[in-house]
Image: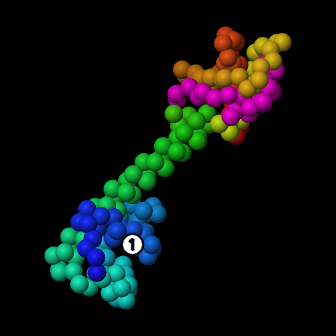
Amino acid sequence: MPAINALRAPALVFSVLVGLGLAWPLAGHAQEAATASRIEQQMTPEQFRAAGLDRLTPEQLANLNAWLNRTLVVETQKAAAQAKQKVEEDSRGFLNFGSSEPILSRVSGEFRGFGQGRRYVLANGQEWEQVDAATLAGVRLAEPEVKIIPSMVGNAWYMQVGKYGTRAKVRRIK
């Protein structure tokens, strides 16, 4: 059997575990990931032998279990942080949830000025509806840049198109 590079061995073992469906804590079971588990309890005896883990010394097996538990906790924490960031980004503009940074995008298609009740679909997939009477008459722009800025107080958002100074109060609907 060819020798396995010592630096690649943990990645190889982890890949095998993922393939066998044994890296279950990465699927969001952070509580279970935080408690120590032993690989020999997660695998059937046949799987344990087939992976060649029965040839490990007790010390090697303990080291593998410790490494797997540390890795699972770290990866679970990373996945949770990424999921939180995605939810915050996707939820911007709905109530007081998500980031309060300005949203920069483009209007999909042609922009024909502001008008109460108009809907604006952005290139980022968001859809906004104008809720005030602000107007920007006579303007026709193809896919202009837009900036949607949150108000300092409350849950109001204001849309500004291109270099025009007029801002329309909008609410996110999609």
Q: Main secondary structure of the magenta part?
A: loop
Secondary element type, mark 1: helix
Q: Is residue 105 magenta?
A: yes
Q: State the residue lying farthest toward the left.
A: 59
Amino acid of disc 1 = Leu
Q: Eyeballing the image, is 95 above or below 29? A: above
Residue depicted at 46% across the width and 48% down the height: 82
Q: Is residue 28 magenta?
A: no
Residue nearest the observer in this picture, 34 or 162: 162
Q: State the residue lying farthest toward the front.
A: 2
Task: List x then y, in percent, for residue 33.
Answer: 35, 64
Residue depicted at 28% across the width and 76% down the height: 2
Q: Note whether residue 115 is visible.
A: no
Q: In the rendered image, which quarter is residue 132 located in?
A: top right
Q: Which residue is mark 1?
A: 17
Task: List x then y, in percent, for residue 172.
Answer: 68, 34
Residue depicted at 71% across the width and 35% down the height: 127
Residue nearest the observer in this picture, 3 or 85: 3
Q: Quadrant of the C terminus?
A: top right
Q: In the rendered image, which quarter is residue 62 located in?
A: bottom left
Q: Quadrant of the N terminus?
A: bottom left
Identify the colour scheme used: rainbow
Task: List x then y, in percent, for residue 90.
Answer: 58, 41
Task: List x then y, in percent, for residue 151.
Answer: 58, 21
Q: State the residue lying farthest toward the bottom.
A: 46
Q: Which residues are magenta?
A: 100-123
Q: Eyeballing the image, is 10 above or below 45? A: above
Asked if residue 165 lies left or right of residue 97, the reply is: right
Specify few, some or many for label 1: CA neighbours under 10 Å numbering under 14, 14-19, or 20 or more.
some
Q: Note whether residue 56 is visible.
A: yes
